[in-house]
Amino acid sequence: MLWSALTRCGGRRPPASDMGRFRTWMPVSANLFDYFDPLNYMDEEAYRHMWMTFFNMMFQGTLARIGAAICLFYSFWYGTYKQKFGLAVLFLVLTTCFAYFGSVARLFGLLGE
């Protein structure tokens, strides 16, 4: 769109009517950032509680065990069968995170009971 505006004018600056289209997206992007900012439509305590619930659910209990088992399977799969050692190490690190992050976070008091 910008290239067609420049080529119509022979490489000179296009008329102001063509440049008006490019200035209209700036307020839209500012509104987009406001739309995705969760603190605009929820208070800080609810936002913190939402993330604490997510981490409690993800790194404790059944979901952590399932995630660790899946990541361990993929670690062995990519390491032995596919011979992609970078992905194998990545999944091994994810297995370690799923297996031990909940305990370490509870030890430091980051996660709830």
Image (tube, rainbow, N blue to C red):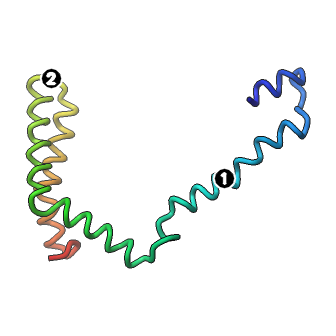
Res 83 label: 2
Q: In whole angstroms, how far apart are the C-alphas of marks 2 and 1? A: 47 Å
Q: Position of residue 78 (x, y in %)?
A: 15, 29
Give the image quarter of residue 10: top right
| Relative depth, front residue between 68 and 18 | 18
- Please state, as top left, top right, bottom left or bottom right, where the N terminus lies in the image: top right
Residue placed under numbered mark 1 in the picture: 28
Q: Secondary structure at mark 1?
A: helix
* In the rendered image, the vertical position of residue 100 relative to residue 11, given as above or below: below
What's under tag 2, amino acid-wise? Gln
Q: Position of residue 110 (x, y in %)?
A: 23, 72
Mark 2 vs mark 1, foreground winner is: 1
* In the rendered image, the vertical position of residue 7 relative to residue 60, given as above or below: above
Q: Secondary structure at mark 2?
A: loop
What's under tag 1, amino acid-wise? Val
Give the image quarter of residue 53: bottom left
| Relative depth, front residue between 14 and 40 | 40
Specify the farthest residue to the front.
41
Q: Position of residue 32 (x, y in %)?
A: 58, 55
Could you tell which of marks 2 and 1 lies nearer the N-terminus?
Answer: 1
